[in-house]
Image: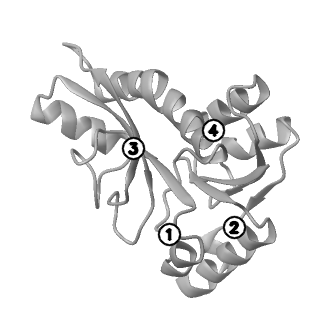
Amino acid sequence: MLDVVVLVSGGGTNLQAIIDAIEDGRVNNARIAAVISNNKGAFALERAAKHGIDHRCVSPSDYADRAEFNKALKDTIDEYHPGLIVLAGFLVVIPPEIISGYSGRIINIHPSLIPSFCGKGYYGLKVHEAALARGVKITGATVHYVDEGTDTGPIILQKAVEVHDGDTPEILQRRVMEQAEWVLLPKAIDMIAKEEA
């Protein structure tokens, strides 16, 4: 059984997609050991509680400096001995000691077709604003392994999503979530649990 720790910062829609996929059998041989957020007010923590999943908040505001926070985050993750860490809208830079300690066992979902609209500064609505500003007709989402760079790790899965005339960043964000992110992330976890990725 693959123990998964999911790191979240906000509403947790990708977390919900993983929970649903595990509960309805689309993800086999994996379970969510814990949900960890940097944000005390993250609705994702309520989603975890509703499904009986262990959940914790490790907030930078509770620590004197970034080094203390990084240590606390790693110590909290380590408690669960995860086989996989999933970044599901986690808006914190992953410290190098976590990346090296869990090399090849951290994945991220990014709301574009990498290498487009990725890297430093491209997150959340900013990705979709940039895609619309550029006038692309196709966007999508990417699940990739996390390395020391920003959105530079090996790609596991990608799925394209059409951009429609009249799209706003919010409308496009929702379509990418529904058609790509919520499909890809559970599928990637299932592949890793089956040692296919």
Q: Position of residue 82 (x, y in %)?
A: 72, 62
Chain-order first, disc 2 or disc 3: 2
The residue where tag 1 is placed is 94
SS at circle 4: helix
Residue 65 appears anywhere in the view: no
Question: Residue 24 or 125: which is nearer the viewer?
Answer: 24
Inter-mark Cα distance, 2 to 4: 27 Å
Q: Are marks 1 and 3 in contact (CB under 8 Å)?
A: no
The residue where tag 2 is placed is 58
In the rendered view, does 183 fall on the left or right side of 27? left
In the rendered view, does 140 fall on the left or right side of 7? left
Amino acid on which disc 3 is placed: Gly
Name the mark nearer the viewer: 2 or 1: 1
Chain-order first, disc 4 or disc 1: 1
Q: Report the residue at 49% width, 33% height from top.
A: 184
Amino acid on which disc 1 is placed: Ile
Amino acid on which disc 2 is placed: Val
Chain-order first, disc 2 or disc 1: 2
SS at circle 2: loop
Chain-order first, disc 2 or disc 4: 2
Inter-mark Cα distance, 2 to 3: 21 Å
Q: Do the residues labelled 3 and 4 touch (CB within 8 Å)?
A: no
The residue where tag 3 is placed is 124
Q: How many numbered circles does the render carry?
A: 4
